[in-house]
Amino acid sequence: MNCRIHFFLLNEDFSIEHAEAHHGGEESESNMKYEWEDELKITTSIDDIVEHEKTVYPIQGTMPEGEAFHFDIENMRLFELKSDESNTLVGCSESILDSFEIEEKEDETVIRIYLKDYEPMSNPVPGIYIASQEFPKELVR
């Protein structure tokens, strides 16, 4: 099965009342529902999706000076996309997760993840959003 993942940053200033009163419930140029959208298409066929609540996401790499690092980011909501070829993780910190939905169609699954607008976050790798307060301070320069 094919899989697409959409991340939406909610606009905390969006007014449903204004949208209903002036635009038939739809957003408008001056009243946007989302600040941005990030879409990922998984190129391998997905066999299963497993949701992990309040779990750990390991982040590792090498500092510019050549020193290796490894940190465990706690309190993450991850979706494990399983296939014969490999497993892929996408998700975000629980503190910035507003909601999510998984829609399964005949030949495609779509995951929509809605992120809260009021807390800064980082996106160290495609498909992973970490709240700034939970990002390792040693990696911020």
Image (spheres, rainbow, N blue to C red):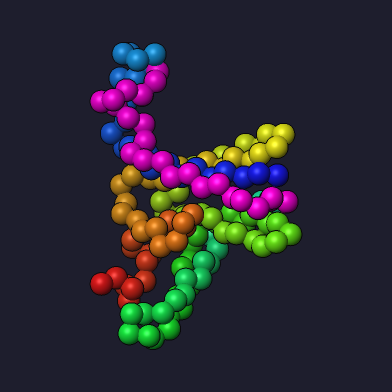
Of residues 97 and 8, which is closer to you in this image?
A: 8
- Specify the segment rendered in magenta: 25-47
Residue 45: horizontal and vertical position, in percent? 69, 50
Q: Residue 62, how many percent across, how many down?
A: 41, 79
Where residue 118 appears, as percent x and y from the top left, is: 30, 47
Q: Please say if 63 is above or below 86.
A: below
Q: Is residue 11 above or below residue 69?
A: above
Please give the name of the residue rendered at 53% of the width and 60% of the height, measured from the top-left corner. Answer: 54
State which quarter of the image contains the N terminus.
Answer: top right
Specify the farthest residue to the front.
Answer: 43
Numbered disc total: 0
Left or right: 3, with 96 as reference point: right
Q: Is residue 71 visible?
A: yes
x 31%, y 54%: residue: 120
Q: Magenta part mainly helix, strand or loop? A: loop
Q: Is residue 78 above or below residue 141?
A: above
Find residue 125 and report its image quarter. Answer: bottom left
Q: Which quarter of the rendered picture does the C terminus lie within? A: bottom left
Asked if residue 53 shows in the view, the reply is: no
99 part of magenta stretch: no
Residue 43 location (% of width, % of height):
61, 51
**Residue sitting at x 70%, y 61%:** 85
Does residue 25 appear left or right of residue 4 in this picture?
left
User: Magenta stretch: residue 42 in it?
Assistant: yes
